[in-house]
Image (spheres, rainbow, N blue to C red):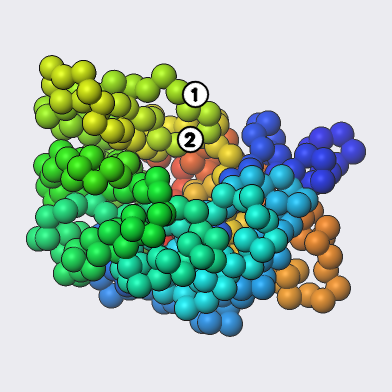
Amino acid sequence: MPAGGLNPAADGLLDRYGRRATDLRISLIDKCNLRCTYCMPEAGLPWLRREQLLSAEEIRRLVRIGVEVLGVRELRLTGGEPLVRKDLEEIIGGIRADHPELPIALTTNAIGLERRAEALVAAGLDRVNISLDTIHRESFAELTRRDSLDKVLRGVEGAAAAGLTPLKINAVLMRGLNDQGAADLLAWSLQHGYELRFIEQMPLDADQQWKREATVTAAEVRQLLSDHYELTPTDEDRGSAPAERFDVRRRGEQAVLGRVGIIASVTEPFCSACTRTRVTAEGRVMSCLFSTEETDLSALLRDESATDADIAHRWAEAMWVKPAAHGTDRPGFELPGFTRPQRSMSAIGG
């Protein structure tokens, strides 16, 4: 711990390895209207009760503390599926009123987004990341256990029409399900001007069926795409961004069609540059996706005697003990010391 103890106002969300969290991710709800195989069981999970969820005002207060006291510089709202919350526009509007310059993004499956996109933009939303693993209907239904591809595509179109750009598409490839459709998904994304990002599957599925050998790796993704396109790493400074980005060209041509990103959390981890702090839908800080320890902020938020400084200090304490990588002292999901978190991805927030 720093000499003299933690000083959140001066040090922000600093950890023992010198990383400072400036990217806040708040889950709004654990509930989702899809059942993706890499996330949750077909029957769903026991959902939080409404009174357990952080309220719009509690979320607004947390963001204010994060920005004004702890040095947060960007915000992403996640789930579950955040569009399930009927007060999403109220949440975003309150945050925007407090922080006119704060970048606010949303991660969503886009179901119903075409009906709400304009209102979300009016409330203050800047952009969206949309989860879409395939553009083939049968593969989509098998992966999500729902025949809802048309609904998602309407949501994507609605987001683009409302100006929620740059629009990013997040895709997880599953061996034998949608991996051979990777180039088709990229072609579709390039055609519409979206930036596609492939994400290696991590051991965060509620069924706990993840196996390292079943993961479609970043190297495999590059090969699948290179059979159709030429990929050239961009010369930009990646910083703390999780995705390695590539310019995409047709083979033998000079024109850049767009960009694609690959997030190699399993095989090429980037933990040493992590700047993220996560708060679950019921108000628990998770310093890492793979944390086995959580710090409750909701009790302080609901304690009338607790000050913003009290909450900031508890939050800073939680981040100070952030592990070096993957919940332990070094990256690697099959190394000694790695323990899966009890929560699945939908219960953590992306």
- Estimate the x, y position of residue 122 in percent, counting from the top left: 51, 65
Q: Quadrant of the C terminus?
A: bottom left
Q: Quadrant of the N terminus?
A: top right
Residue 335: name its quadrant.
top left
Q: Is 143 positioned to the left or the right of 203 in the image? A: left
Find the distance from the CA under tag 2 to the CA under tag 1: 9 Å
Q: Is residue 91 above or below residue 159?
A: below
Residue 332: name its quadrant.
top left
| Label number found at residue 237 | 1
Circle 1 SS class:
loop
Nearest the eye: 350 or 205: 350
Q: Tag 2: residue type?
A: Ala
- Estimate the x, y position of residue 18 in percent, counting from the top left: 68, 31
Q: Is residue 74 above or below residue 19?
A: below
Residue lying furthest right in this view? 4
| Label number found at residue 241 | 2
Q: Residue at x 52, y 71 (%)?
A: 89
